[in-house]
Amino acid sequence: MSKELRCDTPSRRRFLQAAGLFGSIRLLGGSTALGATANSVRLPFVNGERELTRAFPQKGEMILLRTRPPLLETPFDVFDHGVFTPNDRFFVRWHLPYIPTQIDAEAFRLTVHGHLSKPLSLSLHQLMTEFESVEIAAINQCSGNSRGFFNPRVPGGQWANGAMGCARWTGVRLKDVLDRAGVSRGAVQVRFNGLDSGILAATPDFLKSLDIDHARDGEVMIAYGMNGEQLPVLNGFPLRLIVPGWYSTYWVKMLNDIEVLNKADDNYWMAKAYLIPDTPHASITPGQTGFKSVPINRMVPRSFITNLRDGDRVLVGHTVEIRGIAFGGDTGLSKVVWSRDGGAHWTDATLEEDHGKYCFRRWNAHFTPTARGESVLMVKAINTRGVEQPATANWNPGGFMRNVAESTKITIA
Ligand SMILES: Nc1nc2c(c(=O)[nH]1)N[C@H]1C(S)=C(S)[C@@H](COP(=O)(O)O)O[C@H]1N2
Ligand SMILES: [Mo]
């Protein structure tokens, strides 16, 4: 009974209403005219010039890294406006060139098969009405966020810090769907596939897997809503996996196929790609060999100043506000500390509203400079397990998991 009621709530209708009305979206948008100063931006590393584009469907102004398949970065000032990243400014990352530009929401089915007793083929309507609806605020962060800062440089998308975003995700628990399908004894992993594919048959399809216990932890979810709206096409319409606290490589978009495996997944994207050194901070010395690699997994804490940038000037004798966002990674924040002398002394920042342990949290602090000169502002997050951001940057050949404590140099004039 309550299920029927839920199905008629305005928010549920909103997720379905506009579904399938996209016509053919243009994924080839974006001019290649680099250097037009009015609509370009310089990221703070060598070869950091980027076009700003508005050419992608359902997206506002974004930093263009690549057109096809699209890599679009969120301009950093967006993070100063609040903890939830607007859908039209949320970063975009795809691996394979073929992304459907039209999805018929009526005909769409999510298939659940493999090592289970009752294979499922669920319509969007069934998913939205036959399972309990849940919501979680969680950060979607690319494993390679901030890769452009790696020194020595490494290949891959040269992101600054904008390959991350936080949203309220609405959907159903993966556990509930798996329970309905009746997972068989001996299940080891669950594999996720989306509608995108390569153009050449030889291109390995983008498949990611989670261990069965993780898949059934009640937190991992299949989302159809993002910040109260349906998912933008480029962020995975109509369904995507949400893996709170884990890097977004596992957050499979346009999810239409779930397979329960009775052995560990050895497909390319699990066995060969997205591996990190099994060392502290996933860090090695450039050139080092002979280390063990493991699939990338849990996120680590990070924090950013969002209202001041390198080179900003503030006035001696006047109170300065510094503020920003922070997160604990795979758990909540314990505290955020900040420094105005390059890390020699640290002071607790004030933490603002808590939207849940997987979400960005705003922090702020104030100080009144008493002497003119340079000041190196720093910020550092410490999570509830006591893990804190390192003072020196990690390095690995994939350019993954950067989380060094950030610095911003300002001048007191
Ligand atoms: N189907 C599909 N899902 C995918 C990917 C992809 O290439 N195909 N890329 C993953 C990676 S590596 C990232 S960083 C996130 C990006 O999510 P977003 O584009 O919504 O920001 O999607 C993940 N899910
Ligand atoms: Mo990613």
Image (cartoon, rainbow, N blue to C red):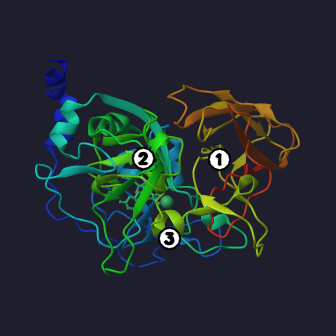
For residue 308, the mark is 1
Nearer the camera: disc 3 or disc 1: 3
Is 406 placed left or right of 4 in the picture? Answer: right
Q: Is residue 324 above or below residue 392?
A: above
Is 125 placed left or right of 116 in the picture? Answer: left
CA distance for labels 1 and 2: 50 Å
Classify residue 274 by image quadrant: bottom right
Nearer to me, 391 or 309: 391
**First reached walking from the N terminus: tag 3 or tag 2:** 3
Q: How many marks?
A: 3
For residue 50, the mark is 3
What's the residue at 45%, 75% (across, down)?
36
Residue that numbered label 2 is attached to:
187
Residues tagged 3 and 1 counted as in contact (Cβ below 8 A): no
What's the residue at 60%, 35% (across, down)?
331
User: Residue 62 location in percent, x, y?
Assistant: 42, 60
Nearer the camera: disc 3 or disc 2: 2
Q: Does residue 54 show up? A: yes
What's the residue at 72%, 53% (across, down)?
281
Label 3's element? strand
Nearer the camera: disc 1 or disc 2: 2
Q: Is mark 1 within 8 Å of ligand 1?
A: no
CA distance for labels 3 and 2: 46 Å
Q: Is mark 3 within 8 Å of ligand 1?
A: no
